[in-house]
Image (spheres, rainbow, N blue to C red):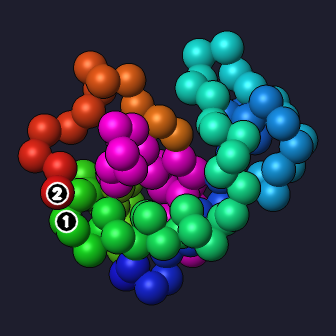
Amino acid sequence: MADRTRYVGSSEHKTYPSFAGQPKLRADASKCDPKLTDADEITSWLRQGMALGNIGEYYEGDFPRYVWIKRGSIVYEGRLVNREQGHYKGYPLAICEHPEGLK
C-alpha cells in the first residue's frame, strides 16, 4: 500500500504557485510552508507515517483516509484525495488536533 501512495498536494492550502497548481487558499484551510516544495520528500513522509502505523481506521478502497507524521514539533495530516491511485494532500495540524499515540 505505501509503495503505491503519492503526495500530490492541494492548491487549497497554498499561498504560492506550486506543483499542486496556482494558489487557491480557502479561508478555513491551514497554510502550507512555502519551503515544502519537494513532492517526493513529502511522499516519503507519508509512507513513513504508514509504516509506523500512524493511520486512521477508516479506509477508502485500499488506502486509509488519514495518515499522520510528525516532523519536529509539527504534525502533518495526509488526507486521501484519490482512492484508486492512493493520492494524498497534506496540511499541518494545530496542537489541539494532534492524534494521540503517534509514533
Q: Identify the residue at horizontal 23%, vertical 58% (top origin).
A: 54
Q: Identify the residue at horizontal 53%, vertical 47% (top origin).
A: 90
Which segment is the magenta one? 68-90
Q: Identify the residue at horizontal 24%, vertical 52% (top origin).
A: 56
Asked which secondary structure carries label 1, the reply is loop
The answer to whether residue 29 is visible is yes
Indicate which disc, 1 or 2, sits on the residue closer to the N terminus.
1
Q: Which residue is mark 2?
A: 103
Is residue 82 rendered to the left or right of residue 99? Answer: right
Q: Identify the residue at horizontal 36%, vertical 45% (top origin).
A: 72
63 relative to 9, above or below: below
The answer to which quarter of the image holds residue 26 is top right
Q: Which mark is residue 53?
A: 1
Q: Are marks 1 and 2 in contact (CB under 8 Å)?
A: yes
* Amino acid type shown at disc 1: Gly
The answer to whether residue 66 is visible is no
Asked which secondary structure carries label 2, the reply is loop
Main SS of residues in magenta? strand
Of the pair 74 and 52, the residue shown nearer to us = 74
Front tag of 1 and 2: 2
Q: Position of residue 77 (x, y in %)?
A: 41, 45
- Queried whether the magenta region covers residue 69, the answer comes back as yes
Q: Position of residue 10 (x, y in %)?
A: 69, 45
Q: Position of residue 16 (x, y in %)?
A: 84, 36
- Queried whether the magenta region covers residue 31, the answer comes back as no
Is residue 6 rendered to the left or right of residue 97? Answer: right
Q: Which mark is residue 98?
A: none
